[in-house]
Image: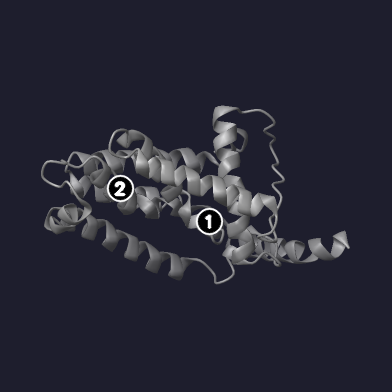
Amino acid sequence: NNQALNYMWARSALLCTFFYVAAFLMLVRGRHGRAALLHVMALMVKAIAFTLPATWLAWDFLYRDRTRHPRLRDWLADWRRLAKPVLLLAVVNVLYLALRHYQLPPWANDTTHEVWVTPWIWMMSSWSALLHYVRIFFWPVGMTVDTDFPYTTAFAEPRAWGALLVLSAWAAAALAAARRHPHVAFASAWFFLTLAPGGQEPVADTSEITEALWLDPEDATDRCREKRLLLAWAPLEKR
């Protein structure tokens, strides 16, 4: 995420990553209580931490003892071993959703994109955005402070079906290599899972909105409403 470098407010991305990785390591070491506490901290920073249970399950499956669990159904049959940490993290996630519903106004997510952008447009646009993230990770050229990433409005556009084709081939290759190269499969799973929450619709983070509301509720509310009006006016202004 290049915003962690060129935006001061995106320090939340680095903070969430710290707690997310720390919680993951605690899960690997079997310290479930500490993992749950760190998971709470990560969720309070960014909603992307919601994916931690799925990421840990992906790790446990890909790096499983293949003599005990040679097949998927053998791994699933040993569900009692996974029940405690998964249930603990699931409870944390449910409490987070309840807190989010209580704290954030219904229109919070509307401030993150233009009013004409549907969940389908956002999801199609995210396919090429994922490849863009990979490109700037390996070849960080052309990055700017204000990134104007174009929307994909129709599946017929090469940016939609082409990107989806590449991502599907990537996922298939990672699965095929899972037995001999589990690190490749897990790195791919980590990438797709952690970016999944924002794939269908942008998610407003509680840390950024509630902090503003706590400091100056009236000013924060006014600024959010102004942003909604600007987003609604932008398409008309282009015409």
Q: Amino acid at mark 1?
A: Gly
Q: Is residue 190 visible?
A: no
Give residue 186's position: percent from left, percent from top. Answer: 35, 40
User: What secondary structure is found at the residue carrying circle 1?
Assistant: loop
* Of the pair 181 and 133, the residue shown nearer to us: 181
Choose top left, top right, bottom left or bottom right for residue 221: bottom right
Q: Quadrant of the C terminus?
A: bottom right
* Of the pair 51 and 204, the residue shown nearer to us: 51
Please report contact status of discs 1 and 2: CB closer than 8 Å, yes or no.
no
Residue at horizontal 28%, vertical 61%?
90
Choose top left, top right, bottom left or bottom right for residue 232: bottom right
Residue at horizontal 70%, vertical 31%?
142
Residue farthest right in this picture? 239
Give the vertical position of 74 relative to 233 (above or below). above
Q: Is residue 61 visible?
A: yes
Residue at horizontal 64%, vertical 54%?
160
Give residue 140's position: percent from left, percent from top. Answer: 61, 28
User: What secondary structure is found at the residue carrying circle 2?
Assistant: helix
Residue at horizontal 59%, vertical 69%?
107
> Mark 1 — residue?
199
Q: Amino acid at mark 2?
A: Ala
> Mark 2 — residue?
58
Of mark 1 and mark 2, the one earlier in the sequence is: 2
Give the vertical position of 185 relative to 152 (above or below). above
| Number of residue marks | 2
Left or right: residue 188 versus residue 36 is right
Q: Residues within 10 Å of mark 1 (few under 14, many from 20)?
A: many
Choose top left, top right, bottom left or bottom right for residue 216: bottom right
Give the vertical position of 93 relative to 12 (above or below). below
Spatial CA distance of label 1 from label 2 is 19 Å
Q: Which mark is residue 65?
A: none
